[in-house]
Structures are given as C-alpha cells and as structure tokens.
Amino acid sequence: MDEIQKNLLEQVAGLHEVPAGAYNIRANGASVERNTTANIDIVTKDDKQGIDIVIKPGTRRESVHIPVVLSQSGLKEMVYNDFYVGDDCDVTIIAGCGIHNSGDSESRHDGIHSFYIGRNSRVKYVEKHYGSGDGRGGKIMNPQTVIELGENSFMEMETVQIRGVDSTRRSTTAALAENAKLVITERLMTHGKQYAESSFQVDLNGTGSSANLISRAVARDDSRQLFLAKINGNSRCAGHSECDAIIMDNAKISAVPEITANHLDAALIHEAAIGKIAGDQIIKLMTLGLTEAEAEEQIINGFLK
C-alpha cells in the first residue's frame, strides 16, 4: 500500500501496522491483505463483491478489522459483507471507509453490512468515514447496515464522519428479539456544500427489548443534513431517540423522529434539538485567551466527543 492509502487506513481504522486477530483490508476494489483465526473465518463471496465473516459460538475478546480505502479517482464499487456471530460471543468489529480523490471523476463506495447475531452475545461495531484530496471529483459513501439481534444479545454501534465526505446516505435497520439491546451513537460534521442523510428504523419485536439512538451533528458553511429516526414498539419494550445538532453559517438541518407503539407496554421517547452555539459560551472561552474561531472549535470538538 502507498502512503496515501496508509493514511486513509489510519484515519478510518486507527491502524499504524497490521492488526492482531482477523482482518480483511480492501484497497481500490480488491482485497490486499487478509488473516483469519481459529474462531473467525473470512470467506470471499462467489456471487458478488464482498465477504462473509463467520464467528464461532463462544468466541470472546477477539476483534475483526475490515477497512476499505479508495485512492483511485473515478472508482465506484458496491460490496456486501455479512457477519454471522454465534451464540455467547464477545467481539469487536472495526470497519470504515476512506476515500482520497485528487481527480475530476466521482469516487464512490457503497456497502451493505448485514449482522446476524446469536443469543447471549455482545458486539461492538465501529464504522468511520473520511475523505481527502483536492480534486474536483466527489467523494461519496452510502453505507447500509442491517441488524438481526438475537435473544439476550447486546450491540453497540458507533458511526463517525467528521471530514471530507461530499455526500452520504447512511441507512440502518434493526430487528430485536427478546431482551435484546441496541445502542447507536452517531457523530457527524458537514462543511462546504456537503450533504448527509442518516436514517434509522428499529423494530422492537421481543419482550424486554430496548434501543437507544443518539446523534450529535454539526453543520457548517452551506452544508445540509437530514436525520430520520423511526422506532416501532411491537412488544413490552423501551425505545429512545435523540438528535442534538449545532447549526452554523448558512447550513440547513432537518430532524424527523417518529415513534410508533403497537403494544400497550411499549415505552417510547423521542427528542430533537437544533440550535446555534450560545454566545456566552464563546465569550467565556475568549476570556481565557482563545480567539472567537478557536472558541468555536473547542465547543464543537467537545460536543462531538
């Protein structure tokens, strides 16, 4: 891999060197490095672009890295990655996509990640997106995540997009069985003329299931954002969605939360707040010696942590 690709890999997966455990590193439309373990297998699909990640029942304290980097201007790809997590597992999965585009043609990565998680398992899933390059060609990512969460299982999903992606449509759907729990945290910042759309649909099907959707977003310059969150309570369950956003300059943000109770004991809450940075916050930091721009950056960085 060249230096551009290595930098992208560090940004989206935190990798300075080959990781321990199982991994599949994809660069410019092809798998360049792969490793499996006794408990985690990675198999190339026969019928379409993508891989199957099979995690044996009882696998604990292991990780899987599956980052994607694109540095070839004009490259467009669609991949399908399926995760089969057995019962009684405790694993961490690190994904993410980085695009460097110094040309005039659009570069685009679309992907569908499907999770089939067994009973009594814990999965932490981290997905980061990053764009770089001074070309006029767009850097576009459209990730889709599909989750089937088994009985008594827990999934924590963290998505981060802070810089450089011109257009993204992120879609997450989830179905939860009895006593399953899902926590999703999104951190997002757009600038320039970028557009970002995040949509979530969670079906709380099992008794005792719960979901918590949290979005922290900042829109700057002339960028636009749309946040859609739909929770269906189909049993005795608990669901909560929360969107907090800071709007700056000439940006536009829309937040559309929706909750539907289809059961007498479904307890559902939604919250949404959009506003500018409070002037007194900036003044307080300026009294400590920061410029107005530095104060804004400090507030934004703290908000997105």
Image (tube, rainbow, N blue to C red):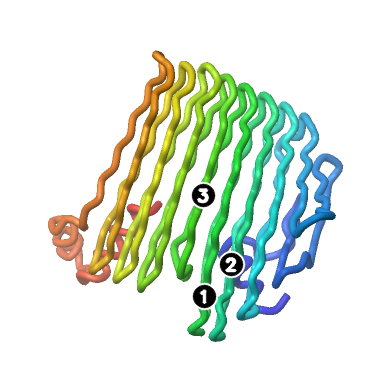
Q: Can residue 13 be seen in this view?
A: no
Question: Which of 136 and 128 lies nearest the eye of the viewer?
Answer: 136
**Could you tell which of marks 2 and 1 lies nearer the N-terminus?**
2
The amino acid beneath tag 2 is Gly
Q: Quadrant of the N terminus?
A: bottom right
Q: In this view, does 273 lie to the left or right of 154?
A: left
Tell me the distance, in whole angstroms, between the alpha carbons under discs 3 and 2. 18 Å
Please name the residue that numbered disc 3 is placed on: 171
Tell me the distance, in whole angstroms, between the alpha carbons under discs 1 and 3. 23 Å
How far across and down, in percent of the image, does residue 52 sit?
77, 48
Tell me the distance, in whole angstroms, between the alpha carbons under discs 2 and 1. 8 Å
The amino acid beneath tag 3 is Ser
Residue 208 tag number? none
Please name the residue that numbered disc 1 is placed on: 132
Q: In this view, does 112 lie to the left or right of 59?
A: left
Q: Is residue 6 left or right of residue 246?
A: right
For residue 134, above or below residue 94: below
Q: Quadrant of residue 3?
A: bottom right
Q: Is residue 39 left or right of residue 249?
A: right
Question: Which of 160 and 230 lies nearest the eye of the viewer?
Answer: 230
Circle 2: element type: strand
Q: Which residue is drawn at 56% across and 55% down?
A: 143
The answer to whether mark 2 and mark 1 are in CB contact below 8 A is yes
Question: Which of 47 and 172 lies nearest the eye of the viewer?
Answer: 47
How far across and down, in percent of the image, does residue 161 sit?
47, 59
Circle 3: element type: strand
Q: Residue at x 74, y 56 (%)?
A: 50
Q: Residues within 10 Å of mark 2 (few under 14, many from 20)?
A: many
Q: Residues within 10 Å of mark 1 (few under 14, many from 20)?
A: some
The amino acid beneath tag 1 is Ser
